[in-house]
Image (tube, rainbow, N blue to C red):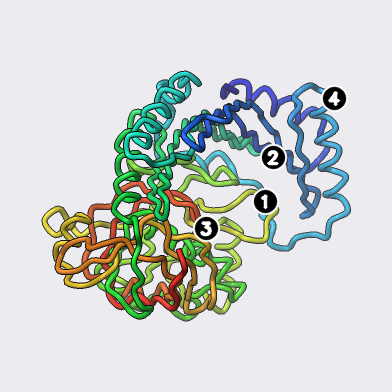
């Protein structure tokens, strides 16, 4: 792995080649490996190690980047020269601030997210886990497909104002799909610590869903009470958090325009962005090296705050919206400069209902007279960005609930549903967990029981 000292040494060499007013380097990369399986057999095993340095230079308000993955002197010199040549022909950016200083990253929350057990995982160990998954599939006369991956990565931001932020972490992931003749089941889990993953439990749950949803029946489209497993919740709500950035408000592309400070969701919805949460992952600083703050985005259904990069906060304070969006200050959620997006919260944590009120999925099913259980969703697209109406389909385990029991598998639905409507109709929630899906980044979210979820069409599978 590229160490903190090595990152500093690379930056020192970069500065020797630069004549810019300011210079910044983002250094990122690591090693990753993946075992892929399908038709009950491993068919791919790959490994990669790569590091990239991205150099940003500044000349009187003009800035640009250039990138290389070679760290010899000549390659670093060429990256600096390319960045400077590009910067000099840019138009000055009136919103560009001086680079962040060391004071902006001091106090970043300490997070320990690098685990030897994850980084040292071997192809043989991954193959053994896949073998256990496949044996479960064969025993149930199903076909298994999926992945098992592990990685170790580093992220560093250094600049000529003395800022030096460094973070390393590991990641591991297992995804399992079990296929029957006319049904399927799915489970996925991700964690910095591979010891938190249980391939057998994931495979058994996916197999159970495939078996229980065999010979699916057709229910008519309409509004149903639904129980959304955490992966389904994640892939839906992930579509709204890009709107919680200050730049989205300034650009008039956020569904929160004219809604900050108002009750948008139900009383039981409280959301934080919290990089230090024990179930979260990622660096405790943003793309400029600024420490990430813990920010309460939603409190009991009321949108309380937005997140900001440094320049966006300054621009917001000078705008007509300054008095309408709650507290305005840099929160450490910016992306590397230059960019057109600004910032976004990426460490989402939903607050649970409390231990006594939390309901597991089985408890929610038992308390439902008639409804639908949804394992996961896919092919989700935004229909109305201001009302946050989404469309998509269920897959890999959709069940009819009747009289408190799973009655049978059903053919998949297409839905059209507003996130504002959905998060105002949450009847019950479970304990938030680290969840992984396919349409959004990992979050800490609970399973949810939601009334009047709008299904518009029935598929043929």
Q: Earlier in the sequence, mark 2 or mark 4?
A: 2
* Residue at mark 3: 344
Farthest residue in the left direction?
356
Q: Residue at x 39, y 54 (%)?
A: 183
Asked if labels 1 and 2 touch by Cβ distance under 8 angstroms, the answer is: yes
Please state which of the two labelled residues, at mark 3 or mark 2, is closer to the viewer.
Answer: 3
Would residue 306 be found to the left or right of residue 444 on screen?
right
* Residue at mark 2: 24
Q: Secondary structure at mark 1?
A: loop
Spatial separation of the CA atoms under disc 4 and disc 3: 36 Å
Q: Residue at x 85, y 40 (%)?
A: 82
- On the image, which quarter does residue 158 sit in? top right
Q: Nearer the viewer, residue 441 or 159?
A: 441
Q: Earlier in the sequence, mark 4 or mark 1?
A: 4
* Residue at mark 1: 337
Would residue 167 be found to the left or right of residue 220 on screen?
right
Q: Secondary structure at mark 3?
A: loop
Q: Secondary structure at mark 4?
A: helix
The x, y position of residue 30, in whole percent, is 59, 28
């Amino acid at each position: 792995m590229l160490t903190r000292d090595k990152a500093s040494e690379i930056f020192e060499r970069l500065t020797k080649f630069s004549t810019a007013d300011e210079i910044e380097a983002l250094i990122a990369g690591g090693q990753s490996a993946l075992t892929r399986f399908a038709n009950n057999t491993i068919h791919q095993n790959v490994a990669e190690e790569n590091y990239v340095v991205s150099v940003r230079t500044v000349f009187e308000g003009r800035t640009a980047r250039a990138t290389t993955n070679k760290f010899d002197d000549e390659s670093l010199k060429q990256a600096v020269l390319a960045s400077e040549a590009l910067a000099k022909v840019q138009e000055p950016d009136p919103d560009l601030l001086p680079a962040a200083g060391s004071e902006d990253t001091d106090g970043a929350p300490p997070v320990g997210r690098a685990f030897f057990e994850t980084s040292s995982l071997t192809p043989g160990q991954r193959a053994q886990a896949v073998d256990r998954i496949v044996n479960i599939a064969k025993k149930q006369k199903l076909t298994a497909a999926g992945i098992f991956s592990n990685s170790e990565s580093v992220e560093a931001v250094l600049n000529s104002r003395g800022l030096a932020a460094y973070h390393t972490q590991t990641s591991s992931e297992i995804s399992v799909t079990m296929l029957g003749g006319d049904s399927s089941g799915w489970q996925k889990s991700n964690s910095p610590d591979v010891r938190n993953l249980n391939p057998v439990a994931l495979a058994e749950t996916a197999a159970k869903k495939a078996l229980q949803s065999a010979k699916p029946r057709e229910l008519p489209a309409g509004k149903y009470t639904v129980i959304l497993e955490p992966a389904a919740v994640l892939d839906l709500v992930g579509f709204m958090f890009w709107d919680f950035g200050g730049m989205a408000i300034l650009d008039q592309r956020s569904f929160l325009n004219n809604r900050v400070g108002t009750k948008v969701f139900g009383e039981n919805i409280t959301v934080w962005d919290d990089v230090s949460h024990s179930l979260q992952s990622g660096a405790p600083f943003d793309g400029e090296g600024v420490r990430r703050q813990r920010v309460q985005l939603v409190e009991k259904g009321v949108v309380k705050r937005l997140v900001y990069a440094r320049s966006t906060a300054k621009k917001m304070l000078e705008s007509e919206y300054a008095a309408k969006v709650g507290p305005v200050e840099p929160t450490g959620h910016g992306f590397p400069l230059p960019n057109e997006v600004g910032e976004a919260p990426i460490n989402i944590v939903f607050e649970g209902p409390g231990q006594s009120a939390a309901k597991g999925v089985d408890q929610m099913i038992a308390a439902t007279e008639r409804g639908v259980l949804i394992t996961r969703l896919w092919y989700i697209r935004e229909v109305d960005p201001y009302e946050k109406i989404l469309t998509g389909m269920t897959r890999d385990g959709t069940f009819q609930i009747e009289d408190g029991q799973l009655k049978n598998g059903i053919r998949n639905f297409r839905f059209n549903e507003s996130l504002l409507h959905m998060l105002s109709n949450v009847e019950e929630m479970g304990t938030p967990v680290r969840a992984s899906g396919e349409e959004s980044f990992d979050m800490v979210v609970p399973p949810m029981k939601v009334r009047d979820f709008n299904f518009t069409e029935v598929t043929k599978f």
